[in-house]
Image: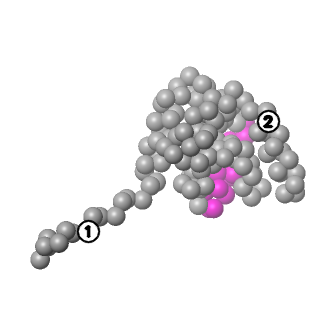
Amino acid sequence: MGGLIRERARTLRREMTEAERCLWYQLRAHRFMGLKFNRQKPLGRYIVDFVCLEMRLIIELDGGQHAEQFVYDQRRDCWLRTQGFDVLRFWNHEVLLQTDAVLERLRLRVEQNQPSPPAPLPQAGEGS
């Protein structure tokens, strides 16, 4: 089964939708906040559209067919969350028509998930 999933992922990488191409342009090569994203990445028995392993963040783009597979998507997202991933979903038309708004929502989620920087150490003579 693993070989079939990997082959399917390769096919999906070759046959990206217009929305996937649009978002991939923004995410690839560490362009977005210096983060590394992979596309069409197998995770378990699923293939996710985009994933940043460092942030444990998955981005899924949904076309019209996803309205009919709502229960499947919920089950899938639930499993991915049990694996420690945060899942963000966007409609294809959002990515194509409101790219900046999508990137802003993504930026806010990344900042929300980043650990706070450590408090600075007191300088010599402070606090005594």
Residue 80 in view of the camera: yes
Comparing labels 2 and 1, the label whose residue is closer to the camera: 1
Residue 22 x, y percent position in the rendering? 63, 29
Residue placed most toward the observer, 13 or 43? 13
Label 1: element kind: loop
Residue 71 in view of the camera: no
Residue 76 magenta: yes
Q: Say what amino acid the circle numbered 1 marks.
A: Leu
Res. 15 image quadrant: top right
Residue 98 x, y percent position in the rendering? 52, 25
Q: Is residue 93 above or below residue 79?
A: above
Outermost bottom residue: 128
- Mark before the other along the chain sequence, 2 or 1: 2
Residue placed most toward the observer, 101 or 77? 101
Q: Which residue is mark 1?
A: 121
Q: Say what amino acid the circle numbered 2 marks.
A: Arg
The CA span between labels 2 and 1 is 50 Å
Q: Going 42% across and 59% down the picture, which residue do you hit?
A: 115
- Tag shown at residue 31: none
Residue 44 magenta: no
Q: Going 86% across and 47% down the picture, which residue do you hit?
A: 7
> From the viewer's perspective, is 102 left or right of 126?
right
Label 2: element kind: helix
> From the viewer's perspective, is 110 left or right of 66?
left
Q: Going 81% across and 43% down the picture, which residue do you hit?
A: 10
Q: Residues within 10 Å of mark 1 (few under 14, many from 20)?
A: few
Q: Quadrant of the N terminus?
A: bottom right
Q: Quadrant of the C terminus?
A: bottom left
- Tag shown at residue 14: 2
Specify the segment rendered in magenta: 67-83
Q: Main secondary structure of the magenta part?
A: helix
Q: Going 69% across and 51% down the picture, which residue do you hit?
A: 76
